[in-house]
């Protein structure tokens, strides 16, 4: 992710990803895990089911290996479920 805003690694950020006017936005809470100037690496910490499904659909559309997307999204969802329990 690239931004001119200065992000604090100690506080979670609310992130909304908008691809176009026709696609529903993807909303999540993320933690900054890497920074280098205006470049940031983030880790998703919370995501609602609608955003998760939209993210998976979008990644599958632009990826040649839908099975990888399925495995990664399933792992993310299971990690989220474990934290909720």
Image (tube, helix red, strand yellow):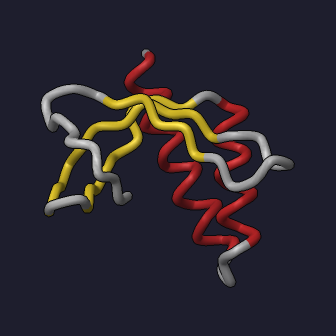
Q: Residue at x 77, y 41 (%)?
A: 24
**Quarter-of-image position of residue 5:** top left
From the viewer's perspective, is 23 left or right of 41? right
From the viewer's perspective, is 41 left or right of 35? right
**Quarter-of-image position of residue 62:** bottom right
Q: Residue furthest right?
A: 22
Q: As rendered, which of 73 and 4 lies closer to the eye?
A: 4
Q: Position of residue 73 (x, y in %)?
A: 57, 52
Compared to 10, does 36 lie above or below? below
Q: Position of residue 44 (x, y in %)?
A: 40, 41
Q: Position of residue 17 (x, y in %)?
A: 58, 46
Q: Residue furthest front?
A: 4
Which quadrant of the figure contains the N terminus?
A: bottom left
Which quadrant of the figure contains the C terminus?
A: top left
Q: Residue at x 34, y 31 (%)?
A: 13
Q: Residue furthest top?
A: 85
Compared to 44, does 60 lie above or below? below
Q: Residue at x 22, y 39 (%)?
A: 7
Please count the marks in the image: 0
Compared to 22, does 38 lie above or below? below
Q: Position of residue 10 (x, y in %)?
A: 13, 29
From the viewer's perspective, is 77 left or right of 42? right
**Quarter-of-image position of residue 63:** bottom right
């Amino acid at each position: 992710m690239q931004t001119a805003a200065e992000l604090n690694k100690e506080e979670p950020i609310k992130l909304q990803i908008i691809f176009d006017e026709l696609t529903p936005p993807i909303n999540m809470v993320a933690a900054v895990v890497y920074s280098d100037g205006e470049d940031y690496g983030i880790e998703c910490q919370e995501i609602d089911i609608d955003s998760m499904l939209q993210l998976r659909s979008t990644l599958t559309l632009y990826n040649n290996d839908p099975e990888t997307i399925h495995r990664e999204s399933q792992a993310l969802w299971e990690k989220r479920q474990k934290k909720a329990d």
